Image: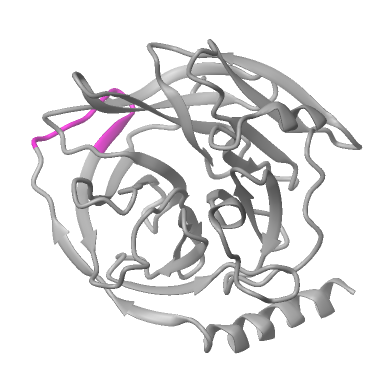
Amino acid sequence: MKRWFFTLLFFLTLINAALADDIRVYAKAVKFAPFQTEDVMLTSITWLSSTDDRFGGFSALLKSKDGFISVTDKGQIARFNPTFQKVTLAPLREKNDDPLKGKSRSDAESLAQGPDGLVWVAFERDHRIVPYNPAGYVMGKKRHLPKDISVLSKNSGLEAIETLQDGRLVLLGEGKNKDDKIPMWVQGKKKGWKKYSLPKEDDFRATGLARLPDGDDLLLLERFYKPAQGVRSRITLLDAYTGKRGRRVAEISSPTPVDNFEGISAHKNEAGEIVITLISDDNFSILQRTLIMTLVMKKAPLN
């Protein structure tokens, strides 16, 4: 049965890929001063742009076998090659294969990949987590959410998701501005969810999660923004089993080029190094940029 499922998933991906659009991307290296912490070293920053009006609004990032996958605020799924210089865009779809329509249905905010290869996409406004193939077609039943997720506001809902090695989901809510806690849920091994409350620190708000290779250690990406103070990003270790922050890995701010980083992924390169990749959400604004930032971990993480 499992072999049949993966065979079907493979052929559907090939067929549906023909319905997606390859668009031209302009990639420009961004200069930066040397930046490193005890844990990571900044190795590259790239500014991506395109004349296609669907390009932008990237709110999540996932490392795939042949590159990277992202989703946008306008209901598109993007498949990048490893260097981010080529991208294929396709609409995320309803269960009946119609493209998602309207902001309330198409505001994709985060994604994660399970052991079966399916891509779980979390949506804001109409809170839900739906399994897709990489071409944007629904491939199963949506995941049952914790009951108290319904109290999240429409535009401050499911901000980040990730899978553990066994396929269980970890969810983070953005929370309201006045809240001093970030809601976190971890799926139980049998049923139900365990809820934690993660204290906010220094007015930073959660934007992304990534699981480190070879374990269940998580990286939490957070963003700070105030008009008079600008934008900053912070990466911290997070324990999925206790809901507690670990060591701060990096805080990125001016003069290092920084934007609205919302997506984070982690993978091992051919040299065995752990590579952290960030993508920024430009909100489809001419005042912002889609930046790809790459950092290399200098040692194995220790909480």
Looking at the rendered image, the quarter that the N terminus falls into is bottom right
Residue 58 picture location, percent across and down: 40, 53
What residue do we see at 19% from left, 19% from top? 228
Q: How is the image coloured?
A: one colour
Q: Nearer the viewer, residue 103 or 107?
A: 103
Residue 153 picture location, percent across and down: 61, 30
What residue do we see at 71% from left, 41% from top? 169
Classify 290 as above or below 135: above
Q: Nearer the viewer, residue 216 or 184?
A: 184
The segment highlighted magenta reads: 33-41
Residue 164 picture location, percent across and down: 68, 41
Residue 298 picture location, percent across and down: 33, 34
Query: Residue 39 in magenta?
Result: yes
What residue do we see at 30% from left, 33% from top? 40
On screen, residue 137 versus residue 202, left or right, reads: right
Total numbered badges shown on the rendered structure: 0
On screen, residue 58 versus residue 132, left or right, reads: left
- Magenta-drawn stretch, dominant element (helix, strand or loop): loop
Quarter where residue 51 is shown: bottom left
Classify 267 as above or below 261: below
Q: Nearer the viewer, residue 162 or 216?
A: 162
Query: Residue 256 in magenta?
Result: no
What residue do we see at 17% from left, 32% from top? 35
What is the residue that sits farthest to the front in this orientation? Answer: 102
Q: Nearer the viewer, residue 131 or 106?
A: 106
Classify 17 as above or below 192: below
